[in-house]
Image (tube, rainbow, N blue to C red):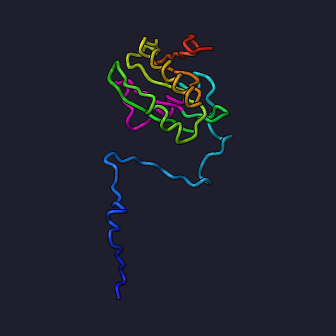
Amino acid sequence: MNTNPILPGLEAVVKPFRFSATPHEFKVTALRECPTPESLLLCDTPDKAAAYWRLHVEKHPYFNPDCECFAVLLLNTRRRVKGHHLVTIGTMDTLLVHPREVFRLAIATSASALVLMHNHPSGEPQPSEADIRVTRDLIRAGQLLKIEVLDHVIIGNPARSSLRELGYFYS
């Protein structure tokens, strides 16, 4: 008697599972270990976003203060930080940013709003034309996805600038 029945032609119908060439790491956390919405940090001003950056993003193991680093704060409907995502690390004066990478984790975590952030290693937080262009592209992408882009905060040393406060966001 055969204890390991093999169906004829099974390999042609069911292909073996293969792992992707670029692995991703996800962490599943038990609900009882997750913070409650009331304990999440409120982030409703550019100053609070800058304080969050200095407290958390600058401590990220991949953060490099000598290069521009682009991060996204993921917010719930009450403007509390669900988490952050270091999207890309560029050179001393350039970043490559694409909406797909910016919104990937926002979609996966059901974030309702984002705060875009990056640093200027020069210490001067004034936005460049490229910063303004990328921000407007990401605002339009967020409108399509129904994920609001609240602000783009540029971190200098020690100052910061907010593109919303400077009037670059549509009213």
The N terminus - image quarter = bottom left
Q: Residue at x 48, y 50 (%)?
A: 27
Is 113 located above or below residue 125 in the figure? below
Identify the residue at the far front of this view.
Answer: 9
Residue 98 drawn at (x, y percent): 42, 28
Viewer-nearest residue: 125 or 19: 19
Please give the range of residues in magenta.
Answer: 51-73
* Quadrant location, the C terminus: top right
Q: Is residue 68 magenta?
A: yes
Q: Quadrant of residue 64?
A: top left
Q: How many marks?
A: 0
Q: Residue at x 31, y 47 (%)?
A: 21
Is 75 magenta? The answer is no
Residue 54, given in percent of the width and then of the height, sits at 49, 28
The image position of residue 57, as x and y in percent, is 47, 32
Which residue is drawn at the image coordinates 55% and 31% (left, top)? 145
Q: Nearer the viewer, residue 163 or 35?
A: 163
The spot of residue 33 in percent (x, y) is: 59, 52
Question: What residue appears at the point 53 percent right and 22 percent down from the top-left corner?
Answer: 140
Q: Quadrant of residue 170?
A: top right
Looking at the image, which is closer to me, 71 or 99?
99
